[in-house]
Amino acid sequence: MYIVLALILAIGFGVIYALLYVLGVSAAGMLAFAAIYFAFQWYISPKVISLFSRLKYISDAEYPDMHRMVTELANEAQVPVPRIAISPSKEPNAFVFGRTRKSATLAVHQGLLNILDREELKAVLAHEIGHIKHSDFAVMTFISFIPMLAMLIAEYFLFFGMFGNSRQGTGYLALFGTGAFVIYVITELFMLSLSRSRELYADNYSATATQKPEYLARALVKITYGQAASPQQNAAPQAARSLYIADSTHARKEAEELIKHKDEISKILSNAEIERLMSSISAQRRGSFISSIFSTHPSTYTRLLLLAKAKGDIDAGR
């Protein structure tokens, strides 16, 4: 995780600095532009997510049991209790977002409340509290600044390279724009890799906090099954999708992998649940290796294997 983080920062700032330096932009100008752009993104992102997710912030009286669980989990994690919001989306999912730990919001889709029992919901909430404890949303907001800045530079240079005055060296501008686009792709892939690793950390935190990793496993099965059964509901705002507890946009050939690891996964799921999951995964659009590296989340079977290992460790320690 730290290696990927360092690579994103080194490649992003290093190459972008070099491109702007060649164009004669002063160091002060580069720093001012980067600071203003990042501050704007940091300020506006939570508002955009809240708006497009159609969130309704709820009081203690509306969902008292969920408020109680979130408060208990936050206190155990020694983090500020987040605000709780409900999204009317029928897609079963949940996520956290915000600028800092103190301003974090934990959003739950109505579709998730419709399919999970109390213990499964608590495991999902623990996963989200894990993101707050690790400051994942703040880290991802900061890191996403690098590829977004590279894309802005690429669009600017490519536009003037194609449509600018030829006497202004538009060929070089197009070349710089292409280089910035390559940097965008590389840093985006690193960022997605970081996102997948942080999801696994949050899964592990949930398993440790609840001491019942099988509940999160069952929740993931229901979420995956629900998304596959109603693919039209997956048209969720892309601004929030990387924050979700699960994302089936880039479906992969997971059924075969589940068969290979059925013995390990059977520690946390019944045969009926495994068959149901395999059926749902098979119903999804199958992708390639390319789709997997562009995914914001680890594959379902990878997460189930981690949870199965966590259950084995917990049982062995009892």
Image (cartoon, rainbow, N blue to C red):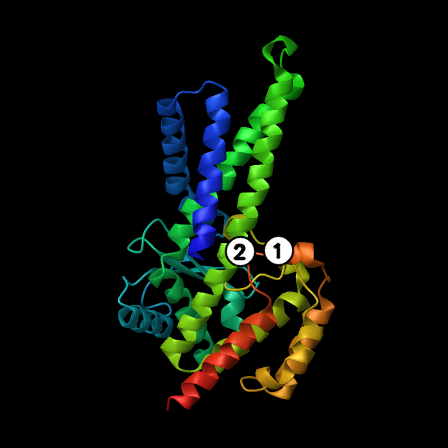
| Image quadrant in which the N terminus is located | bottom left
> Mark number for residue 193?
2
Disc 2 is placed on an element classified as: helix
Q: Are marks 1 and 2 in contact (CB under 8 Å)?
A: yes
Disc 1 is placed on an element classified as: helix
Q: Relative to residue 223, is residue 228 drawn left or right?
A: right
Q: How far across and how far down the image is residue 37, in percent? A: 41, 33
Establish if 279 lies above or below 287.
below
Establish if 130 lies above or below 177.
below
- Amino acid type assigned to the residue bearing label 1 in the image: Ile
**Res 266 seen here:** yes
**Res 116 seen here:** no
Q: Nearer the viewer, residue 2 or 33?
A: 2
Query: Mark 1, residues whose alpha carbon is within 10 Å: few (<14), some, or many (≥20)?
Result: some
Q: How far across and how far down the image is residue 284, in percent? A: 71, 65
Distance, label 1 to label 2, CA atoms, is 7 Å
Q: Report the residue marked by disc 1.
A: 293
Q: Relative to residue 142, is residue 225 drawn left or right?
A: right
Establish if 211 lies above or below 127.
below
- Amino acid type assigned to the residue bearing label 2 in the image: Ser
Q: How far across and how far down the image is residue 43, in percent? A: 37, 41
> Mark number for residue 67?
none
At x 60% / y 66%, what residue is drawn? 299
Q: Nearer the viewer, residue 112 or 283?
A: 283
At x 43% / y 67%, what residue is drawn? 202
